Image (spheres, helix red, strand yellow):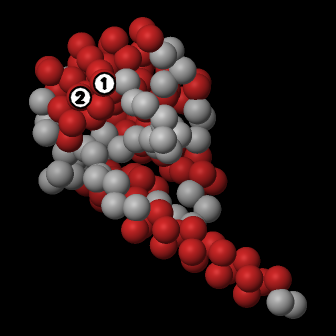
Amino acid sequence: MMRIPAILALAGAITLGGALAGAPALAAQSDEREAVGTPEDPNWSAAKRLVAARDYDGAAPLLRQVVAADPKNADAFNYLGYINSRNGETDAALRYYRQALAIKPSHRGANEYLGELYLKLGDLPAAEARLKVLDDACFFGCSEYTQLKKAIADYKTTGTFVPRKDG
Protein backbone atom coordinates (compact mmCIF):
# COMPACT_ATOMS: atom_id res chain seq x y z
CA MET A 1 0.00 0.00 0.00
CA MET A 2 2.91 2.37 0.58
CA ARG A 3 3.91 2.12 -3.09
CA ILE A 4 1.11 4.31 -4.46
CA PRO A 5 1.99 7.41 -2.34
CA ALA A 6 5.66 6.94 -3.19
CA ILE A 7 4.88 6.70 -6.90
CA LEU A 8 2.66 9.77 -6.74
CA ALA A 9 5.34 11.70 -4.86
CA LEU A 10 7.94 10.73 -7.46
CA ALA A 11 5.61 11.69 -10.32
CA GLY A 12 4.94 15.04 -8.67
CA ALA A 13 8.65 15.67 -8.18
CA ILE A 14 9.36 14.85 -11.80
CA THR A 15 6.56 17.11 -13.01
CA LEU A 16 7.60 19.95 -10.70
CA GLY A 17 11.24 19.51 -11.65
CA GLY A 18 10.34 19.86 -15.31
CA ALA A 19 8.28 22.95 -14.61
CA LEU A 20 11.10 24.52 -12.61
CA ALA A 21 13.69 23.84 -15.27
CA GLY A 22 12.60 27.11 -16.83
CA ALA A 23 13.28 26.23 -20.45
CA PRO A 24 11.83 28.99 -22.61
CA ALA A 25 8.70 28.06 -24.50
CA LEU A 26 9.44 28.17 -28.20
CA ALA A 27 6.85 28.94 -30.82
CA ALA A 28 7.26 25.56 -32.51
CA GLN A 29 7.43 23.38 -29.46
CA SER A 30 10.20 20.84 -29.46
CA ASP A 31 10.88 17.77 -27.42
CA GLU A 32 14.48 18.92 -26.92
CA ARG A 33 16.42 15.74 -27.39
CA GLU A 34 19.84 17.21 -26.48
CA ALA A 35 21.40 15.59 -23.44
CA VAL A 36 22.34 17.81 -20.52
CA GLY A 37 25.98 18.85 -20.74
CA THR A 38 26.32 17.95 -24.43
CA PRO A 39 27.68 20.71 -26.65
CA GLU A 40 24.88 21.96 -28.87
CA ASP A 41 25.26 22.63 -32.60
CA PRO A 42 25.58 26.42 -32.98
CA ASN A 43 23.23 26.32 -36.01
CA TRP A 44 20.63 24.55 -33.86
CA SER A 45 21.02 27.10 -31.05
CA ALA A 46 20.72 30.02 -33.45
CA ALA A 47 17.76 28.46 -35.29
CA LYS A 48 15.83 27.96 -32.04
CA ARG A 49 16.42 31.61 -31.11
CA LEU A 50 15.25 32.76 -34.55
CA VAL A 51 12.11 30.60 -34.43
CA ALA A 52 11.31 31.99 -30.98
CA ALA A 53 11.71 35.50 -32.43
CA ARG A 54 9.50 34.49 -35.39
CA ASP A 55 12.33 35.09 -37.86
CA TYR A 56 11.39 32.06 -39.92
CA ASP A 57 13.30 33.11 -43.03
CA GLY A 58 16.46 33.36 -40.96
CA ALA A 59 15.87 30.05 -39.17
CA ALA A 60 15.04 27.89 -42.21
CA PRO A 61 18.52 27.68 -43.78
CA LEU A 62 20.08 26.96 -40.39
CA LEU A 63 17.56 24.18 -39.77
CA ARG A 64 18.31 22.66 -43.18
CA GLN A 65 22.00 22.61 -42.17
CA VAL A 66 21.08 20.96 -38.87
CA VAL A 67 19.13 18.12 -40.51
CA ALA A 68 21.86 17.68 -43.13
CA ALA A 69 24.37 17.14 -40.30
CA ASP A 70 21.94 15.24 -38.06
CA PRO A 71 19.21 13.49 -40.09
CA LYS A 72 17.73 12.02 -36.88
CA ASN A 73 16.93 15.42 -35.33
CA ALA A 74 13.15 15.20 -35.02
CA ASP A 75 13.03 18.62 -33.34
CA ALA A 76 14.67 20.30 -36.34
CA PHE A 77 12.27 18.58 -38.75
CA ASN A 78 9.39 19.75 -36.54
CA TYR A 79 10.63 23.34 -36.73
CA LEU A 80 10.93 23.08 -40.52
CA GLY A 81 7.36 21.81 -40.65
CA TYR A 82 6.23 24.66 -38.43
CA ILE A 83 7.99 27.30 -40.55
CA ASN A 84 6.61 25.90 -43.81
CA SER A 85 3.11 25.65 -42.38
CA ARG A 86 3.24 29.28 -41.21
CA ASN A 87 4.47 30.31 -44.68
CA GLY A 88 1.60 28.47 -46.42
CA GLU A 89 3.85 25.73 -47.84
CA THR A 90 1.50 22.87 -46.97
CA ASP A 91 3.22 20.07 -48.90
CA ALA A 92 6.63 20.89 -47.43
CA ALA A 93 5.13 21.22 -43.94
CA LEU A 94 3.47 17.81 -44.23
CA ARG A 95 6.73 16.27 -45.43
CA TYR A 96 8.76 17.73 -42.55
CA TYR A 97 6.22 16.81 -39.87
CA ARG A 98 6.09 13.27 -41.22
CA GLN A 99 9.90 13.09 -41.15
CA ALA A 100 9.88 14.21 -37.50
CA LEU A 101 7.28 11.56 -36.67
CA ALA A 102 9.16 8.85 -38.57
CA ILE A 103 12.08 9.53 -36.23
CA LYS A 104 10.00 9.97 -33.07
CA PRO A 105 6.32 8.95 -33.43
CA SER A 106 5.39 10.41 -30.04
CA HIS A 107 6.98 13.84 -30.74
CA ARG A 108 4.55 16.18 -29.01
CA GLY A 109 5.22 19.32 -31.07
CA ALA A 110 5.06 17.55 -34.43
CA ASN A 111 1.85 15.74 -33.48
CA GLU A 112 0.18 18.94 -32.33
CA TYR A 113 1.18 21.04 -35.31
CA LEU A 114 0.44 18.27 -37.82
CA GLY A 115 -3.00 17.95 -36.23
CA GLU A 116 -3.54 21.68 -36.66
CA LEU A 117 -2.38 21.49 -40.27
CA TYR A 118 -4.87 18.69 -40.89
CA LEU A 119 -7.60 20.95 -39.52
CA LYS A 120 -6.50 23.71 -41.93
CA LEU A 121 -6.84 21.14 -44.71
CA GLY A 122 -10.29 20.08 -43.48
CA ASP A 123 -9.23 16.60 -42.39
CA LEU A 124 -10.84 16.24 -38.96
CA PRO A 125 -10.27 12.45 -38.64
CA ALA A 126 -6.52 12.87 -39.25
CA ALA A 127 -6.38 15.67 -36.65
CA GLU A 128 -8.22 13.48 -34.15
CA ALA A 129 -5.70 10.69 -34.81
CA ARG A 130 -2.88 13.09 -33.85
CA LEU A 131 -4.84 13.96 -30.68
CA LYS A 132 -5.02 10.26 -29.82
CA VAL A 133 -1.24 9.96 -30.19
CA LEU A 134 -0.80 12.96 -27.89
CA ASP A 135 -3.22 11.49 -25.38
CA ASP A 136 -1.06 8.37 -25.23
CA ALA A 137 2.24 10.35 -25.20
CA CYS A 138 1.24 12.83 -22.49
CA PHE A 139 0.78 10.60 -19.46
CA PHE A 140 0.32 13.53 -17.05
CA GLY A 141 -1.14 15.83 -19.70
CA CYS A 142 0.72 18.39 -21.77
CA SER A 143 0.12 21.71 -23.46
CA GLU A 144 0.32 20.17 -26.93
CA TYR A 145 -2.62 17.89 -26.16
CA THR A 146 -4.60 20.76 -24.63
CA GLN A 147 -3.95 23.07 -27.61
CA LEU A 148 -4.90 20.48 -30.23
CA LYS A 149 -7.98 19.43 -28.28
CA LYS A 150 -9.11 23.08 -28.19
CA ALA A 151 -8.39 23.53 -31.91
CA ILE A 152 -10.46 20.43 -32.71
CA ALA A 153 -13.34 21.65 -30.52
CA ASP A 154 -13.22 25.05 -32.23
CA TYR A 155 -13.15 23.33 -35.64
CA LYS A 156 -16.21 21.27 -34.74
CA THR A 157 -18.02 24.45 -33.68
CA THR A 158 -17.02 26.71 -36.57
CA GLY A 159 -16.20 24.28 -39.38
CA THR A 160 -12.84 26.02 -39.92
CA PHE A 161 -9.43 26.02 -38.28
CA VAL A 162 -9.11 28.91 -35.82
CA PRO A 163 -5.41 29.69 -35.30
CA ARG A 164 -4.34 30.64 -31.81
CA LYS A 165 -3.32 34.17 -31.08
CA ASP A 166 0.30 33.20 -30.28
CA GLY A 167 1.17 31.57 -33.53
Q: Position of residue 68 (x, y in %)?
A: 42, 9
Which element type, helix, strand or loop, lies under badge 2?
Answer: helix
Q: Nearer the viewer, mark 1 or mark 2?
A: 1
| Residue linked to disc 2 | 46
Say which amino acid is labelled 2.
Answer: Ala
Drawn side of residue 92 relative to residue 16, left or right: left
Residue 52 picture quarter: top left
Residue 87 picture quarter: top left
* In front of the other: 92 or 46: 46
* In front of the other: 26 or 132: 26
Q: Position of residue 72 (x, y in %)?
A: 54, 20
Q: Position of residue 43 (x, y in %)?
A: 29, 21
Res. 30 visible in picture: yes
Q: Would you place residue 155 above or below residue 90 in this image?
A: below
* In front of the other: 9 or 96: 9
Quadrant where the image shows the N terminus: bottom right
Q: Would you place residue 89 above or below residue 20 in this image?
A: above
Residue at far bottom of view: 1
Q: Which residue is painted at 14% across and 20% down in the image? A: 57
